[in-house]
Structure formats: C-alpha cells, structure tokens
Image: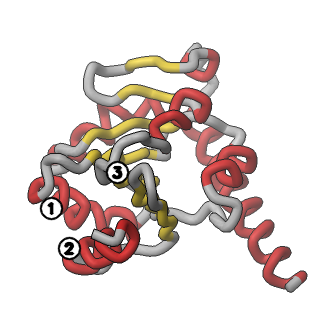
Amino acid sequence: MLTAIFYKRQKKLFLCLILIISFCVSCKNEKTDVLTKNVSKISNDIPIYNFNTLEPLLYTKTNKTYIINFWAMWCAPCVKELPYIQQYANKNPDAEIILISLDFPEDIETKLKPFLKEKNITSKVILLDDPDSNTWIDKIDPNWSGAIPFTIIFNNKKRGFFEHTFSSLEDLENTITKTLNL
C-alpha cells in the first residue's frame, strides 16, 4: 500500500519537474502576463485557461455526452489517440469534445495550430496553463497519477476516468457505452 502511494507521488513529482524544467527552458527570460490572467486568448481559436476557469467545464447538468481529454503534442500516446477522439466527434456531433492541451502558451501559433491542422483535429482545444498541477490533478481525480493522456467521459448521471490510451475508435466507443450505460 505504501509503495503504491509512494509511486503515485513520485509520478506526480516527476511530471511537475518535467513541466517546470520545460517551462523554464522555453521562457527565454521573456516577460508575459499570461500567467496573471484567468483567461487569455492568444488566438481566436485556442483560449488559455487556468484551472479555476477550466473546472466548470468538467461538470454538466445535462444528459449530453462529454469527453474531456488531457494531452500534449510531446506525448506520443496522446498523439496516437487524437484521431480516434476526432473520429468519434465527427460521428457524434451532439457530443461535447474538449481537448485540454498541456503545451505552452507561446507555442500556440507556431506549433500547436500547425499540429492540429496537420492532424485534421477540429474539436475544441483549450490550453491549460496552471503551474499548480499537484492541486488540480487531485481535484479532477484523486486516483490520477498526473500521466497523460487522461480522459474524462461523463454526463449528468455517470462519470468515468481513464488514464490510458484508446487503441481505436471502437475501443473509445465501447468505453463510452459502458461508462454512460448507453
């Protein structure tokens, strides 16, 4: 039991360390006020949220199907499953799909938008820029180690958390059906 708790905390610490190092390397001593704003838009298409602004999107009062996927361009398993999530969105226009990017705000125009265009990802993308990941990860799901991809599938009655890569559209559809009892 203690080993599992220690392992979970080590994974969170490792993820935070990687994010901090990556952020420090990418900043290049440029000043920005993005971190001081709750919501900022670098572009019309990809808003930047902190966790307090994002959190209301993680709940609903309707029976509508929601899929919230935490991912990043540098995460190979995340990139692998994005086409399946997009295929599901294309087949199910009534479902709400939100892709929460953990990439860097300064990369939206030069890297993120070209990546989304190249991969034909048209689902809604929000960039989460909140350095206090140890707090918000536990608020989302105390069992989440912080690893990505991480997907929340929910409606007003059911909710499921998935810390793994969906291997196909069929895998994603089956998981949604089982989670929401559709």
Instruction: Give the residue number, with chain letter if any, for mark 3.
Output: 66
Query: Which mark lies nearer to you, 2 or 3?
Result: 3
Give the residue type that dot 3 points to. Answer: Tyr
The answer, for residue 175, to whether it is visible in the render is yes
Q: What element carries label 1?
A: helix
Which residue does the numbered mark 2 point to in the structure image?
A: 169
| Residue 116 percent location from the top left of the image | 23, 46
At 61% across and 40% down in the image, what residue appears? Answer: 23
Task: Say if mark 2 contacts mark 1, CB within 8 Å.
Answer: yes
**C-alpha span from label 2 to label 1:** 7 Å
Location of mark 1 (residue): 87
Quadrant where the C terminus lies?
bottom left
Q: Real-space Cα distance between discs 2 and 3?
A: 16 Å
Amino acid marked by disc 1: Gln
Quadrant position of residue 33: top right
Mark toward the start of the polypeptide (2 vs 3): 3
Q: Is 129 left, or right, of 71 in this rendering?
A: right
Disc 2 residue crowd, few under 14, some 14–19, many 20+, Cα 10 Å: some
In this view of the protein, which residue sits in the foreground, 32 or 2?
2
Label 1 CA crowd tier, 10 Å (few <14, some 14–19, many 20+): some
Q: Which of marks 2 and 1 is nearer the N terminus?
A: 1
Q: Is residue 97 left or right of residue 107?
A: left
Give the camera-side residue of 178 and 14.
178
Q: Is residue 105 above or below residue 179?
A: above
